Amino acid sequence: MSSTSAQISSRISSPVVKADSGIDDLQARIKEIAGPIQILDSLNALREWRHNARAQATDVGFVPTMGALHEGHLDLVRVSIAHNPLTVVSIFVNPAQFAPHEDLATYPRTLERDLEALKRVVTETSSNDEASSTSAARSKGALVVFVPSVRDMYPSGITQEVELQKGTFIQVKGYEHEMEGKSRPGFFRGVATVVTKLFNAVEDIQQALLLRRLVSDVLLSHPLPENLHIVPTHRDASTGLALSSRNAYLTDRERVWAPTLYKALKAGQAEWEASITGASGKDVDVKTVKKAAEEVIERVIKETSQGEGAESVRIKSDYISLNWADSFEPLETIEGQEASRKRLEERGVVISGAMWVGKTRLIDNLVLAGSGWIIR
């Protein structure tokens, strides 16, 4: 069995293939599904491809993912294709961002379905503007999928036990322990590490803002902070539920209650607007913003706890957090000099939260101020 075969077969939901002929069939099926998309399944293959792109002075967009692609991921791919002649999409379930008790083993791995979705994006992109020579050039080899092995990404090996990990890891001190980092210590260490590796190979609101800080602090030559784009969260059109690969874990009954977090954050957003309206020059107590969001979740917890049997849904709040976007510092009181609309827009404010619906942990966020520089 070739190393290439081993890497591909470990990434798709297929029966274990024991014969070389079976592996050959698997590779042929993957190639057929991929169509115009080139698949690079080793670091050496990516480096060779990137060397050729650099030699032609070609800009390359990069969309890092853990697979199980949904419309949110695909929107990022569309944006990248629209702005760059070439785009790389990485698919790698990163062990370093999962704690020992989290869902690394069961995280959805759906390479075949992901390739089908990416192929549709390539097809729609080229068909939307067939008359454009630039569009035609992009549609020919415009999208590359990088599917590395764990050995490629972590040459020293990797364990989910942080204290047992060996090798080089990246931490963004003073930023990674707020908001989502309080509930998932080590998570952003894993994110910062793997994305730095991917940036060097080729790149939720806090992840994106933290990565902008990372590329600035470690003086990366690519991408520059201004070239790391954050786009609006893709949501279910009818419920507002943020799309996530983990939504696949939800049962039909749980999915009914999954939009609760979004509704809670919207309640917080409404309270925020009421609190700061006309407050320029005055201190503003914004604890009521968190309270408004928390009360929405508390009401739903009471309602769902009264069900029995199949009607019962376990909902548990993890956190609601209000933070400055430029520092991630918790925000409870806005002092007078910070309360002007101009200053709030300069610093940025984010409300974020996490809650459990059954066994699925959902996260979400809304930008309350500073969307002009945060979302771009």
Image (cartoon, rainbow, N blue to C red):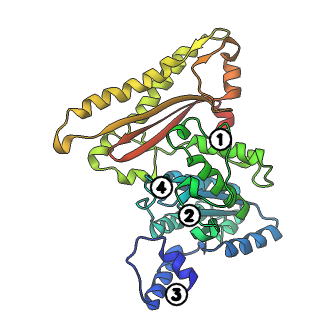
Q: Label 3: state its secondary structure.
A: loop
Q: Quote the CA–CA distance across marks 2 and 1.
A: 21 Å
Of label 4 and label 1, which has the lower sequence position? Answer: 4
Check disc 2 and report the residue beneath it: 91
Q: Quote the CA–CA distance across marks 3 and 1.
A: 42 Å
Percent x, y of residue 194? 63, 57
Of label 2 and label 4, which has the lower sequence position? Answer: 4
Label pair 2/1, CB-CB below 8 angstroms: no
Check disc 4 and report the residue beneath it: 70
Check disc 1 and report the residue beneath it: 209
Report the residue that reaches farthest toward the left.
308
**Given the image, on which type of amino acid does mark 3 rest?**
Met
Circle 3 residues within 10 Å: few <14, some 14–19, many ≥20: few
**Residue name at image x 55 percent, y 53 percent:** 97
**Which of the two discs, 2 and 3, sits closer to the camera?**
3
**Given the image, on which type of amino acid does mark 4 rest?**
His
**Residue name at image x 41 percent, y 83 percent:** 17
Report the residue that reaches farthest toward the top.
282
Label pair 4/1, CB-CB below 8 angstroms: no
Q: Label 2: state its secondary structure.
A: strand
Q: Quote the CA–CA distance across marks 4 and 1.
A: 22 Å
Q: Place residue 338 in its image quadrant.
A: top right
Percent x, y of residue 132? 68, 63
Circle 1 residues within 10 Å: few <14, some 14–19, many ≥20: many
Check disc 3 and report the residue beneath it: 1
Percent x, y of residue 216? 77, 45
**Given the image, on which type of amino acid does mark 2 rest?**
Ile
**Which of the two discs, 3 and 4, sits closer to the camera?**
3
Label pair 3/1, CB-CB below 8 angstroms: no
Q: Is residue 332 visible?
A: yes
Q: Quote the CA–CA distance across marks 2 and 3.
A: 22 Å
Q: Place residue 154 in its image quadrant.
A: bottom right
